[in-house]
Image (spheres, grey):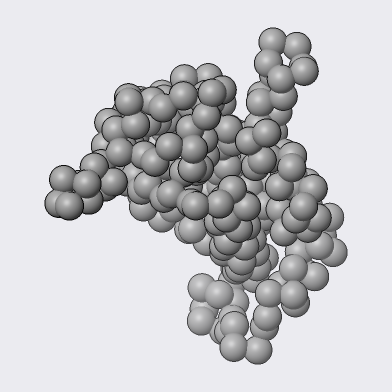
């Protein structure tokens, strides 16, 4: 029984989806610094473009089903099936170590002169495919809430730094309305993160990027991004 439990902890289960998630505390701290709104939007879009290069590099290296990222997080979705065979014979620790090492090397090419960072990897397994979408929606809600709050602080930078900006009477809808009124460019990438998905019918198996709320049209998004068949 102990050996069986150990194997379940060390190896992926057959034909169940799982996610390897990468997080960097140092990158999050750099992003969360309050600045002028225009400058903050620029820096967040720069980080987003860098992470998109990382996500596509991970895609080309490991051939997952989906890669979703925002701010300091990268979530790599895998399926054990005929089209996506088990990597490293299903050894979870080898897979996590490999992805973490690869992601660190790739990102270091762009950020080594700006910030010292490390990644922490986590493994999550799901008994049902639709629960993968629920997980990504949860992370997307976190992305939207945190970044809306950050941009709102930047919009009212002086009040925030002087301690006059309080959030007990300001809800997320109010903050979103103020930001929407500014018609900011590329705001979708910041509020929703980016989903990278390989489009097999496109030339050279093109990896497309999508910036949209996953909680809308749940069934359609499940078929587009998550379903393995």
Q: How many labels does the image show?
A: 0
**Residue positioned most to the left:** 2
Q: In the rendered view of the protein, which quadrant contains the C terminus?
A: top right
Residue at 55 percent across and 75 percent down: it is: 160
**Residue 139, how many percent across, how many down?**
56, 57
Residue at 74 percent across and 47 percent down: it is: 221
Q: Where is residue 82, by image quadrant?
A: top right
Residue at 81 percent across and 62 percent down: it is: 180
Residue 160 seen in this snapshot? yes
**Residue 220, how many percent across, how many down?**
79, 48
Residue at 75 percent across and 55 percent down: it is: 218
Viewer-nearest residue: 53 or 88:
88
Viewer-nearest residue: 61 or 13:
13
**Residue 55, how many percent across, how many down?**
53, 31
Q: Is 178 left, or right, of 138 in this rendering?
A: right
**In the image, residue 220 above or below residue 145:** above
Q: Is 20 left, or right, of 215 in this rendering?
A: left
**Residue positioned most to the top:** 204
Viewer-nearest residue: 106 or 92:
92
Q: Is 70 left, or right, of 156 in this rendering?
A: left
Residue 136 seen in this snapshot? no
**Residue positioned most to the front:** 1
Viewer-nearest residue: 215 or 27:
215
Q: Where is residue 197, by image quadrant?
A: top right
**Residue 96, how many percent across, how many down?**
33, 36
């Amino acid at each position: 029984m102990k050996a069986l439990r150990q194997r379940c902890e060390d190896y992926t289960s057959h034909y169940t989806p799982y996610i390897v998630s990468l997080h960097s505390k140092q990158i999050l701290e750099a992003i969360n610094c309050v600045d002028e709104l225009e400058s903050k939007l620029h820096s967040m879009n720069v980080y987003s473009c860098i992470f998109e290069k990382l996500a596509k590099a991970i895609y080309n290296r490991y051939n997952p089903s989906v890669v979703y990222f925002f701010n300091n997080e990268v979530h790599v979705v895998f399926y054990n099936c005929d089209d996506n065979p088990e990597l490293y014979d299903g050894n979870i620790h080898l897979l996590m170590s490999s992805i973490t090492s690869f992601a660190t090397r790739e990102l270091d090419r762009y950020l080594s002169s700006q910030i010292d960072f490390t990644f922490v990897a986590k493994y999550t397994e799901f008994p049902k495919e639709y629960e993968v979408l629920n997980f990504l929606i949860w992370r997307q809600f976190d992305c939207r809430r945190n970044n809306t709050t950050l941009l709102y602080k930047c919009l009212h930078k002086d009040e925030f730094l002087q301690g006059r900006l309080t959030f007990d009477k300001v809800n997320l809808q109010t903050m979103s309305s103020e930001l929407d009124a500014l018609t900011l460019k590329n705001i979708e990438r910041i509020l929703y993160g980016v989903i990278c998905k390989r489009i097999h019918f496109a030339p050279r198996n093109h990896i497309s990027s999508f910036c949209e709320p996953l909680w809308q049209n749940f069934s359609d998004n499940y078929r587009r991004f998550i379903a393995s068949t």
